[in-house]
Image (tube, rainbow, N blue to C red):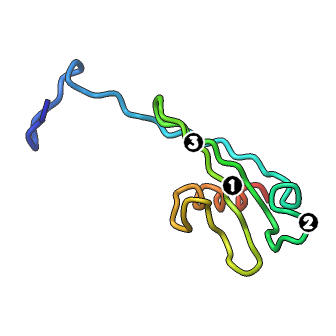
Amino acid sequence: MAVKRGAKQTAGSRKQDVVRRVRIAEKDPCSMCGKGTSVERVFRVEETMGKAKNAHLVFFDKRHGWYCEHSAHCPAVKDVKKFVRHSR
């Protein structure tokens, strides 16, 4: 149901907000990427939005910096950077 600007929604017409939940776990870079890797840190990110679930691997590499297996612009990269800042 579309609601016009300025119109009030009733309790029955509101859609439930989908909450994005993120679980982050650090993994061993040598076991994940091999002995000679330039990757210094690896994180597994489990993202849940409603019933949808996604898993990400986020890496910190000496040469390439932070990136996810999906892209360097993946939201999981931002989540991990925030997690690392707050866990110090």
Q: Name the residue at 75% across, 46% down.
A: 25
Farthest residue, direction top = 12
Q: Amino acid at mark 3?
A: Glu
Asked if residue 88 lies left or right of residue 67, the reply is right
Q: Circle 1 — which element?
A: helix
| Of marks 1 and 3, the one in the foreground | 3
Asked if residue 63 lies left or right of residue 76, the reply is right
Q: Name the residue at 60% across, 61% down.
A: 77
Q: Amino acid at mark 1?
A: Phe
Camera-side residue of 43 and 30:
30
Q: Residue 30, how many percent across, how many down?
A: 88, 61
- Residue located beneath label 2 in the image: 35
Farthest residue, direction bottom = 63
- Residue located beneath label 3 in the image: 47
| Of marks 1 and 2, the one in the foreground | 2
Q: Name the residue at 61% across, 45% down.
A: 55
Of the numbered discs in the image, which one, if any, rests on residue 83?
Answer: 1
